[in-house]
Amino acid sequence: MEYIDTHCHPHFDDFLPDPEKILADAAEAGVGRMIAVGTTLADSQKAIDFAGAHKNVWASAGVHPHDAAAFLADATSPEKLKQLLNKSSTHTPKNKFSGGPIVAIGEIGLDFYKNYSPKQDQIDCLKRQIEIGLPLGLPFIFHIRDAWDDFWPLFDSYSGIKGVIHSFSSNEQQLENALTRDLYIGLNGIMTFTKDGSQLEAAKEAPLNKMLLETDAPFLTPKPFRGQTCEPKHIVTVAEFLAELRGEELEELATATTTNAVELFGLDQHE
């Protein structure tokens, strides 16, 4: 069985001095491909460099809502993001990418739980990044926390958006809202330790053909490894938990989520 970690940060300093071991351990566990997700312009460049240097690792570029104010404060930020995306990706209308490691714009979104950037700055930053990404045909990786009421009207003001709700940990109503907009659902280690039954019910109800697996490594380590640094190899633990929760065969879940990741992000094998 092959798994794909569709959202991790193997380029973070948390994995120094030996990121190669992280990748080797992931491969041994069956995690054949992964996406290194950018969170700022500088971090996105690191993700791109990391992906370019490693077999079967891709990257995304974008600015996390926590850093929205800094993005807007620099008038050159939008052009810098465009340059990152344009120099590192090629694409076709079917979202099949080749010739560069960029496969998505993200992670972007709204986080009104911590509000490290003012709400309006987050909204303006999200709009700007959607407008940059849409002409490129790139899928989006959305980080949405305590901000659904603002996110859905904003989302609906555009057409042609494809992507995933990263780290989905909400209820069945928000699941339905995402699915009616043809978005994928990214599930990670939160499911193994949440005490919110509505989150587990939503995870049960997510259609298998719209699910993606992720770790968000080095964050959100699943049980029973809490207290350790999360790694891409832990995607297997997430998959095992979800298969049992949903009453599915592990191989069925692994095959479907791998197929979904390839379809959305175009993760053809590369050297």
Image (cartoon, rainbow, N blue to C red):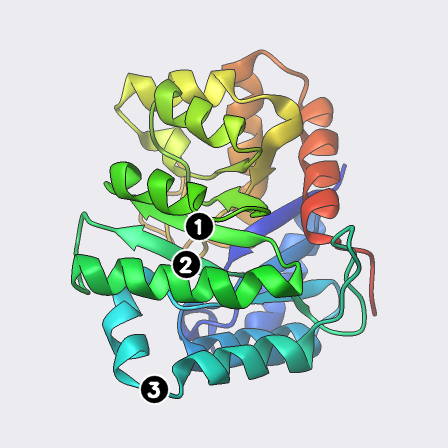
Q: CA distance from mark 1 to mark 2?
A: 5 Å
Q: Residue 76, percent across and down?
A: 40, 88
Residue at image position (53%, 43%) is: 164
Q: Residue 59, percent across and down?
A: 60, 67
Relative to residue 74, is residue 11 drawn left or right? Answer: right
Outermost top residue: 247
Q: Nearer the viewer, residue 245 or 66?
A: 66
User: Quick check: marks 3 and 2 in contact, CB under 8 Å?
Assistant: no
Q: Is residue 142 above or below residue 103?
A: above
Q: Is residue 259 above or below residue 11?
A: above
**Nearer the N terminus, badge 3 or badge 2?**
3
Residue at image position (61%, 30%) is: 210
Q: Quadrant of the N terminus?
A: top right
Q: Residues within 10 Å of mark 2 (few under 14, many from 20)?
A: many
Residue at image position (68%, 46%) is: 264
**Nearer the N terminus, badge 1 or badge 2?**
2
- What is the number of the mark on residue 108? 2
Q: Is residue 3 among the parts visible in the rendering?
A: yes
Q: Residues within 10 Å of mark 1 (few under 14, many from 20)?
A: many
The secondary structure type at the circle numbered 3 is loop
Q: Which residue is mark 1?
A: 142
Q: Residue 8, percent across and down?
A: 51, 57
Q: CA distance from mark 3 to mark 2?
A: 18 Å
Q: Amino acid at mark 2?
A: Ile
Q: Nearer the viewer, mark 3 or mark 2?
A: 3
Q: Amino acid at mark 1?
A: Phe
**Nearer the N terminus, badge 1 or badge 3?**
3
Q: Which residue is mark 3?
A: 75
Relative to residue 37, is residue 173 drawn left or right? Answer: left
Q: Amino acid at mark 3?
A: Ala
